[in-house]
Image (cartoon, grey):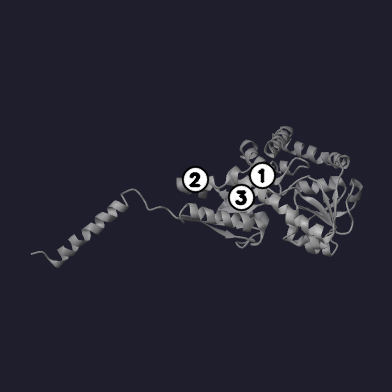
């Protein structure tokens, strides 16, 4: 006689066999991964709205939900913007998006694209940065896994009460700068550079703590800086640079198909799209100043050459600095200019 226990045992066998077929020995279930991405920008900033959040959503879609990216803007996970790169390096977070120069002195080679008159449009410069990385910057980022480099369009000089039409107009003016190279250029032009994060610039301008700021049009709009400035000197000198990079061990721990999903969605193709995004966002920022009736100043070729000559010591100082690191600074600048020209065409 067959016992009820034996009947139950035999009845369960097809389910067991089905399980063996579904999950063969040695083949684990598809891995699901959640990555934490930390950045300093507000949730409403263009970088989060039009880049980081859509990129995270697309990764989740293309991996059928196996790879999720949780985005934490506005330093929600703690620390200061200058801490972001270290957070990715040390594994406190998985991915960060930041301005390399916020980690003061950490990325001197990257700053070649901040040297005066090296960069071009955001679209050209962003693509150039990614190709340049493979040749010149791998050592500089060896302790993380960079995903994409990109830049804004060129920053411009915006002032509250005194226009800047010539080199002499800089003399003694307190102007907010955003990086080491940027402040050195302002000094060379005759200004008094003042360092501060961009969220503090509105109040500083309104209270007269600074008389101007050096930012692209795209930064003016979200921080309402057009409300406290009246003159805008358009000269293509240097942009703001960005990097999105990942904890190296975390990237290497991913299964091959998830690595491929990340690789396929980043790099130079993404840089091109981001550059166009920044270039396009210049137009509405500029339009606000035009509508307000502000004066927009364009330098003559001769005046531009005067600025270029005045800023040359900054370029020479950079060449000397990287030369002390065993690098050929002149060759690096020439290659950066070549790549910007290549992608401009």
Task: Single out the residue that lies furthest toward the bottom.
Answer: 4
| Residue under label 3 | 244
Disc number at residue 275?
none
- Vertical placement of residue 345 versus 190, above or below: above
Q: Is residue 182 left or right of residue 266?
A: right
Q: Quadrant of the N terminus?
A: bottom left
- Give the CA distance from mark 2 to mark 3: 17 Å
Query: In the rendering, at what x and y percent does residue 98 appear?
Result: 65, 52
User: Dot 1, how many residues are within 10 Å of its Cα: few (below 14), some (14-19), or many (20+)?
Assistant: many
C-alpha distance separating marks 1 and 3 = 12 Å
> Would you say residue 143 is visible in this rendering?
no
Which numbered mark, 1 or 3, is in the foreground of this view?
A: 1
Which residue is under mark 2?
Answer: 260
Find numbered disc 3 in the image and state the secondary structure of the residue it sits on: strand
Left or right: 258 as drawn, with respect to 246: left
For residue 301, what is the image quadrant?
Answer: top right
Q: Residue furthest right?
A: 168
> Mark 1 vs mark 2: which is more N-terminal?
1
Secondary structure of residue under mark 1: helix
Is residue 57 or residue 108 the one in the foreground?
57
Instruction: Look at mark 1 in the image and give the residue it sits on.
Output: 126
Q: Are marks 1 and 3 in contact (CB under 8 Å)?
A: no
Q: CA distance from mark 1 to mark 2?
A: 22 Å
Q: Position of residue 83 (x, y in %)?
A: 65, 55
| Position of residue 115 measured from the top left corner of the image (x, y, whole percent) | 76, 42
């Amino acid at each position: 006689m067959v016992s009820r226990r034996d009947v139950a045992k035999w009845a369960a066998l097809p389910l067991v066999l089905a399980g063996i077929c579904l999950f063969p020995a040695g083949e684990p279930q598809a891995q699901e991964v959640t990555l934490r991405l930390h950045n300093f920008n507000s949730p409403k900033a263009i970088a989060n709205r039009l880049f980081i959040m859509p990129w995270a959503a697309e990764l989740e879609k293309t991996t059928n939900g196996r790879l999720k990216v949780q985005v934490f803007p506005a330093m929600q996970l703690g620390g200061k913007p200058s801490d972001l790169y270290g957070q990715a390096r040390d594994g406190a977070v998985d991915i960060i998006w930041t301005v390399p120069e916020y980690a003061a002195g950490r990325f001197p080679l990257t700053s070649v694209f901040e040297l005066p008159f090296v960069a071009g449009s955001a679209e050209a410069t962003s693509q150039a940065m990614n190709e340049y990385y493979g040749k010149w910057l791998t050592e500089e980022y060896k302790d993380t896994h960079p995903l994409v480099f990109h830049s804004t369009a060129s920053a411009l000089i915006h002032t509250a009460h005194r226009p800047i039409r010539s080199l002499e107009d800089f003399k003694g003016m307190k102007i907010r700068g955003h990086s080491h190279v940027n402040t050195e250029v302002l000094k060379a032009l005759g200004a008094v550079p003042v360092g501060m994060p961009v969220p503090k610039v509105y109040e500083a301008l309104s209270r007269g703590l600074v008389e101007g700021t050096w930012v692209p049009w795209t930064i003016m709009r979200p921080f309402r800086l057009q409300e406290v400035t009246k003159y805008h000197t358009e000269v293509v000198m240097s942009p703001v640079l960005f990097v999105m990079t990942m904890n190296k061990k975390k990237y290497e721990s991913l299964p091959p198909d998830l690595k491929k999903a990340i690789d396929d969605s980043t790099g130079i193709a993404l840089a091109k799209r981001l550059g166009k995004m920044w270039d396009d966002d210049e137009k509405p920022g500029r339009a606000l100043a035009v509508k307000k009736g502000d004066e927009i100043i364009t330098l003559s070729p001769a005046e531009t050459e005067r600025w270029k000559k005045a800023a040359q010591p900054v370029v020479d100082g950079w060449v000397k600095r990287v030369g002390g690191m065993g690098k050929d600074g002149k060759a690096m600048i020439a290659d950066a200019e070549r790549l910007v020209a290549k992608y401009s065409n």
